[in-house]
Image (tube, grey):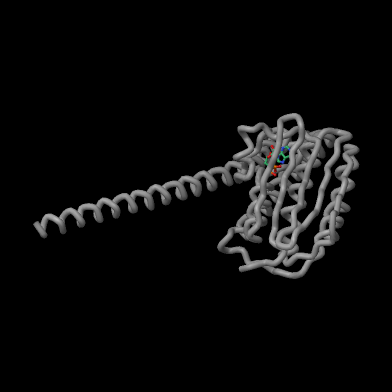
Amino acid sequence: HEDEMISVVGCTEVKNMVTAMNEILAKAQVLENSRQEFVSNVSHELKTPMTSMKVLADSLLQQGETVPAELYREFMNDIVAEIDRENVIISDLLSLVKLDKKAAKLEISSVNINELLEMIMKRLKPIAGQRNIELILESFRPVTAEIDEVKLTLALSNLIENAIKYNQDDGWVRVSLNADHKYFYVKVADSGVGIPEDCQGQVFERFYRVDKARSRETGGTGLGLAITKNAVLVHNGEIKLYSKEGEGTTFTVRIPLKYQA
Ligand code: ADP
């Protein structure tokens, strides 16, 4: 009878172990799939400008000396634009790698967030001005927080840049800053195109774009929100989005005032 008890206990333990192993294997498979997908996306994104450059350069070569000066200049300009794009993708990828939760080394200092937002918005004003988009900053109180200034600047700039990029002419972008005793809150609201509900879960994924053409047209790589989310997470913060297609988008960011490793 005792033997039977042992075998019953043993059997349950083995079953639990098998279940646990299967769970670990399933998680490893998910990670592996996402790694493969990432590598394939990176290759695709980097190959696209490369392919255009090759076509343009080949065409110039084929025409040799006979190529009209006008056409030569046009093709060369296109090649330079593709090289610029390649550079943007690579620098976004590097930012993303640096913001990997395990690898991220934060340079924490005490930063005046009101001034940080003013600085970001001043820098983006000319871009907004081109399409007569109004940039509004509402600071409800003075906020000083312990953050990595470079990484958080990147995160917030991306949000405000997107709010301009995916807006309509003569629209507005409202950035507001508030705080309580524990956190500060930045809200970036826009009067733009909005994000369809079924895409809202994916926009933080690397290389995901709702409208590929519009994103590419405006120099987007599909990495901006992935960078922003990682930068917020390494600060132990939180980011959420509210949007309705055609009715604008609001991103809210919550970051602890004091950083804890
Ligand atoms: P991209 O480089 O394409 O801008 P992001 O990662 O910054 O990439 O954003 C992913 C996608 O989310 C964008 O391609 C766009 O479709 C959508 N998106 C981001 N921000 C906004 C916004 N404020 N309004 C509408 N759509 C947005």
Name the residue located 88 percent from the left edge and 46 percent from the top edge. Answer: 136
Of all residues, the one furthest to the left in this rendering is 1
Pick the residue in front: 178 or 153.
178
Name the residue located 67 percent from the left edge and 46 percent from the top edge. Answer: 240
Measured as percent of width and height from the top left, residue 169 is found at 86, 33
Of all residues, the one furthest to the top in this rendering is 246
In the rendered image, the quadrant that contains the C terminus is: bottom right
Name the residue located 71 percent from the left edge and 38 percent from the top edge. Answer: 215
Measured as percent of width and height from the top left, residue 172 is found at 85, 39
Measured as percent of width and height from the top left, residue 235 is found at 66, 61
Q: Is residue 15 depicted above or below 163 in this figure?
A: below
Of all residues, the one furthest to the front in this rendering is 1
In the rendered image, the quadrant that contains the N terminus is: bottom left
Where on the picture, by quarter, is residue 41?
top right
Name the residue located 58 percent from the left edge and 41 percent from the top edge. Answer: 44
Q: Is residue 163 depicted above or below 94 in this figure?
A: above
Total of numbered circles in the picture?
0
Measured as percent of width and height from the top left, residue 99 is found at 63, 59
Pick the residue in front: 204 or 85.
204
Image quarter for ligand 1: top right
Q: Is residue 66 depicted above or below 221 in this figure?
A: above
